[in-house]
Each structure stands twice: as structure tokens, then as C-alpha cells.
Image: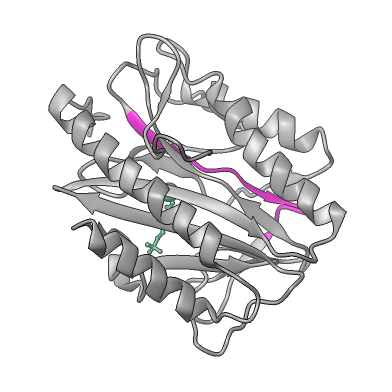
Amino acid sequence: MAVSIKSKAEIELMREAGRILAITHHELEKQVKPGMSTLDVDRIGEEIIRSYGCIPSFLNYNGYPASICVSINEEVVHGIPNKNRIIQEDDIVSLDAGVIYKGFHSDAARTLIMPEVSDEVKKLVEVTKQSFFEGIKHAVAGNHIADISKGVQKYAESFGYSVVRDLVGHGVGSKLHEEPEVPNFTGLRRGIKLRPGMTIAVEPMINLGDYDVYWEDDDWTVVTEDGLPSAHYENTILITDGEPEILSQAPGIPL
Ligand code: MF3
Ligand code: CO
């Protein structure tokens, strides 16, 4: 199936979904503290999303049992909230969330730094975020998906980090996951040509050590093989005639 081009009206709905998602992340960033359980984080996030009349995209998606993916340290993505998993002072906490507003999704992730995280791991989180921005510099009409991938990869690897291979970004719209795939690494294919009206989730997952990951027995939680930390940063963006527009943001809230 071809990659969908969103109409003006659809883009407007995705802007609103993205605004609410950015507010949700901002609130979580303020509220998430060591001592809380990852289930507490999920409860708070779900409540904010519903308070705006939105539906959490992830809840029951392929059987995923929560609204917010909470992934700590060596957990890369898709950690399942649990009342017995307590956030520690030296944890990095990746929060991935999606909202549905009037049938349209927005998808975004942030990695939070608890008070006693080492400088080495803080740097990983900062570089992961910046790698998103390095990638989307190339997210312009006429370029290909791989131009974004290359921007992310080059930047992250220049710090000696590695880019996760087993998971990729994706198109997003009336479904959480649409075509095309948006890898954070380059391979044989340059991918589709970008056109105005395409909406994609760009989501670097960057490891301090090697890129190998495995799935835990819960079939969701993705973990680094070497046990070293991993960070995640994601936004939903719109391809335009000029620079890409970040849809998962809100006025007055820093990215
Ligand atoms: N946010 C994830 C992604 O970017 C999706 C989470 S899958 C879910 O693709 F099942 F946890 F919802
Ligand atoms: Co995503």
C-alpha cells in the first residue's frame, strides 16, 4: 500500500493530538520521581491523556497492557508498567506514549534523567535527543527516508554509541504504525521519497554499548544484550514544502 498523504483537516487533527501528547510528556517530566513505581507513571499518564478526551494509543495495541511504555536503563523500549518496579535515583527512564484524537494518532518518547545519573549516561540521553534533530534536518521533500536515517546514525556513532537495528520508526496517522519504516541506520535501501503531507515518527534508540537487543519473556520489554543503558527520543513530524514540522509539541513547552 502506498504511503498516505494527509489532508489539511487530518493534519489539523494530528497537530491537536501532538499538542496533547506534548503536554502529557511535560506533565510526566515534572511528576516522575525516584520512589514512584512504573505503574504510577502509567496511571498518571493515562489520566492526563483521558482528561483531554483522548484515547491512549498503546493500550491494548497488539495486547500491550498499558498506556505508557516505561523503560529503565538497559531496557530499550516497551517496558511494561509494574507496581513493584520502583524508579531509582540513578535511573534513566524512557517514556513512550501515544494519543488518539478524533481518530488520529501522535507518537512521542522522552528519556528522563533522575537526580543521580552519571555524566556518561546523561551524555547518552542528550546525544540521543540531538540525533533526532540531526536526522530531521534531512526530512525534506525530495529526500529519501535513508537521508534521515543517515543523519541520526552518523551523529550517534560519532560519539561511539550504537544504533538499535531491530526496531524502527514508522509512518503514523489514522493508525499508530503505517508505512513507511523509518530506520535509524542505513542499509541497502534508500526508502521512499519524502513528499509534503507525509507524517512519520522518527525515533532514535541509541545504546551506550553494542546494538544487540533481545525480547524479555513478557514478549514486550526490549533489553540490551550487554546490559548497558539505552536512550529513546521520538516525535511525530510532518513533511512540508520546507522544514519539517514537529507535530508532537505544544506552545510554551520545550522539546
Ligand atoms: N511507541 C511505540 C512505537 O513507536 C509503539 C509502542 S507499541 C505498544 O512504535 F504496544 F507498546 F503500544
Ligand atoms: Co513510534
Q: Vertically, is 234 above or below 140? A: below
Viewer-closest of 217 and 130: 130
193 left or right of 212 in image: left
Is residue 103 in view? yes
- The residue located at (74%, 46%) in the rendering is 162
Q: Based on the displayed image, in which of its 4 quarters is residue 42 positioned?
A: bottom left
In magenta segment, residue 92: no
> Residue 105: x percent and y percent?
27, 47
Q: Quadrant of residue 248?
A: top left
| Part of the protein shown in magenta | 199-212
Q: Indicate whether 129 appears above or below 96.
A: above
242 left or right, relative to 156: left
In the rendered image, residue 73, in percent from the top left (x then y), is placed at 69, 66
Spot the residue most to the front: 252
Q: Residue 147's x, y, as percent?
A: 56, 21
Q: Residue at x 36, y 34 (%)?
A: 247
Does 148 sit above or below residue 120? above
**Can residue 177 be seen from the camera position used here?**
no
Residue at x-position 39% and y-position 19%: 194
Q: Residue at x 47, y 79 (%)?
A: 40
Give the quadrant of the N terminus: top left
> Could you tell me residue 111's position as x and y percent?
60, 55
Q: Is residue 119 left or right of residue 177?
A: right
Q: Nearer the viewer, residue 166 or 156?
A: 156
| Number of marks present in the image shown | 0
Q: Quick check: 159 above or below 6?
A: below
Does residue 196 appear left or right of residue 249 in this picture?
A: left
The picture quadrant where one finds residue 141 is top left
